[in-house]
Amino acid sequence: MRWALITLESLAAGVFAILVSLVAVVIGLNLWARYMLGLGPRQAVGLDPISLIGPHWKLALLGIPVAIFVFGFSAGFWFFSKRLHT
């Protein structure tokens, strides 16, 4: 039962890592558009994922969040299993 709880807590940590990274990306793009490009609040800029990431953009758009999730899951699993043993 304890390992099931550790696994669920680790899944939550992985999902939390994804959410934090998405919020960081949105805030970073907003600050970049506002201060680096000088765009106002009602102006917009189009971002082309192929020019940003390259020809393998589908793999990158899937692989980057999966890597962040795996990192968050493994960090959560390590932390919660250490907490179990102490």
Image: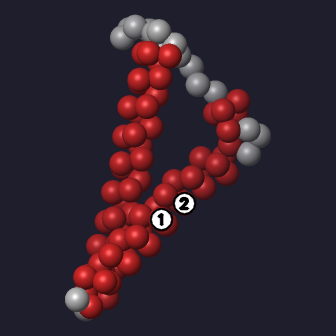
Q: Nearer the viewer, residue 22 or 31?
A: 31
User: Residue 26's quadrant in the figure?
Assistant: top left
What residue occupies the far front of the structure in this picture?
86
Q: Which dot marks residue 67?
A: 2
Q: Residue at x 37, y 40 (%)?
A: 23
Q: Position of residue 63 (x, y in %)?
A: 60, 55
What residue occupies the far right of the structure in this picture?
55
**In the rendered image of this protein, does residue 10 appear above or below residue 23?**
below
Report the amino acid beneath label 2.
Answer: Ala
Q: Position of residue 81 (x, y in %)?
A: 32, 84
Report the amino acid beneath label 1.
Answer: Phe
Q: Residue at x 54, y 60 (%)?
A: 67
Q: Residue at x 77, y 40 (%)?
A: 55
Q: Residue at x 36, y 48 (%)?
A: 20
39 vs 10, left or right, is right
Return the residue at label 1. 71
**In the rendered image of this protein, does residue 19 appear above or below residue 29?**
below
Quadrant for the N terminus in the image: bottom left
Q: Position of residue 27 (x, y in %)?
A: 38, 32
